[in-house]
Amino acid sequence: MASLKEIRTRIASVKSTRQITSAMKMVSAAKLRKAQDHIIQLRPYANKLNEILSNLSSSLSVEENPYGEEREIENVLVVVFTGNRGLCGSFNANIVKSVTQQVHRKYRKQLHNKQLDIFCIGKKGADLLKGKGYLIKQVNTEIYDAISFKNILPIAEDIMSKFINKTYDRVDLCFNEFINASAYTVHYDQFLPIEQPENMDDVQHTDYIFEPDKEYIVKELIPRSLKIQFYRALLDSNASEHGARMTAMHQATDNATELVKQLTLDYNKARQAAITKEISEIVGGAEALKG
């Protein structure tokens, strides 16, 4: 059994760790509240805009809507949204696992021919993918310092221009979609070209009146919708990360509390055993002197 000093030292260490995890939990909870408000406010607008423009893009030709051009897949870009820090459970690992599975399932040929690029938004994803032997084309870690639609625009516009210029034939996004404070789900979605609605019969029988005209829709609304979708992926990932970290730190704090209780019990048992031993030695010595 460990000595009393060793147990006291370990109790003090666990209590110190518990203070840290408890503080991190409160910080993450505060950040989560703000991030959650942002994604909840944006989601209805982004969903409806994406639904409308997906339907409209099906009625536009490739010349009218270059963002919907389907072509043979040669060069692929996968944008991976992770965090810059750890201590958030399996948040980052789940994204990397999904990316590796999807890449090997959908783009095995491009991966073998080195025609697949990975753009990591967040340091942890880049580190994990590099560890698995993947070549990372680009990493952006600064965006989380000041998340805003204005700051995400240059990234989204660059990716969209590379699709138009045929640098990439397919662009996919992989991110964690926020559900609630303790739950999120991994999404691997096609970003470009714009996917057509699953039920094309409904679209074919719809008579659209374009107001404003098609040219304005292509030049303004469709690019804006794509940027909103990209921004939404970032907000979802950010909120999910804070939720995952808050949950992980909550569990760590509870585990530390249970460990302190167990160590305190062990300390009391060891102390009682030491006292009993000393009493026995004193009584034995007294009996020896009487004899």
Image (cartoon, grey):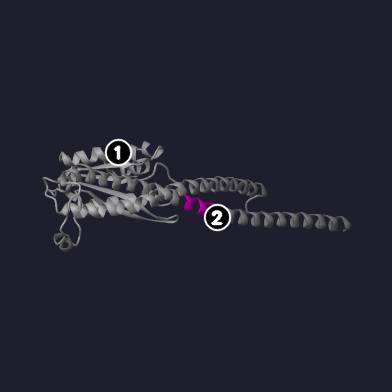
Front residue of 3 and 49: 49
Choose mark 2 or mark 1, whichever is in front: 1
Q: How many marks can you see?
A: 2
> How far apart are labels 2 and 1 at the CA level?
41 Å
Q: Is 92 or 5 nearer to us in this picture?
A: 92
Residue 163: horizontal and vertical position, in percent? 18, 42
Taking the magenta stretch, the answer to whether it contains residue 92 is no
Tell me the SS state at disc 2.
Answer: helix
Q: Position of residue 121 (x, y in %)?
A: 33, 41
Percent position (x, y) of residue 84?
A: 40, 41
Which residue shows up at 15% across the image and 38% down it?
165
> Can you identify the residue that label 2 sits on?
254
Image spot of residue 184 (x, y percent): 39, 55
Amino acid type, label 2: Asp
Query: Is 218 positioned to the left or the right of 48 in the image?
Result: left
Nearer to us in this view, 125 or 176: 176
Left or right: 100, with 64 as reference point = right
Extent of the magenta region:
245-255
| Magenta stretch prevailing secondary structure | helix
Q: Quadrant of the C terminus?
A: bottom right
The residue depicted at 31 percent of the width and 51 percent of the height is 46
Residue 153: mark in rendering: 1
| Residue farthest right in this picture | 290
Please tell me whether mark 1 sits on a helix, a strand or a loop: helix
Identify the image quadrant of the N terminus: bottom right
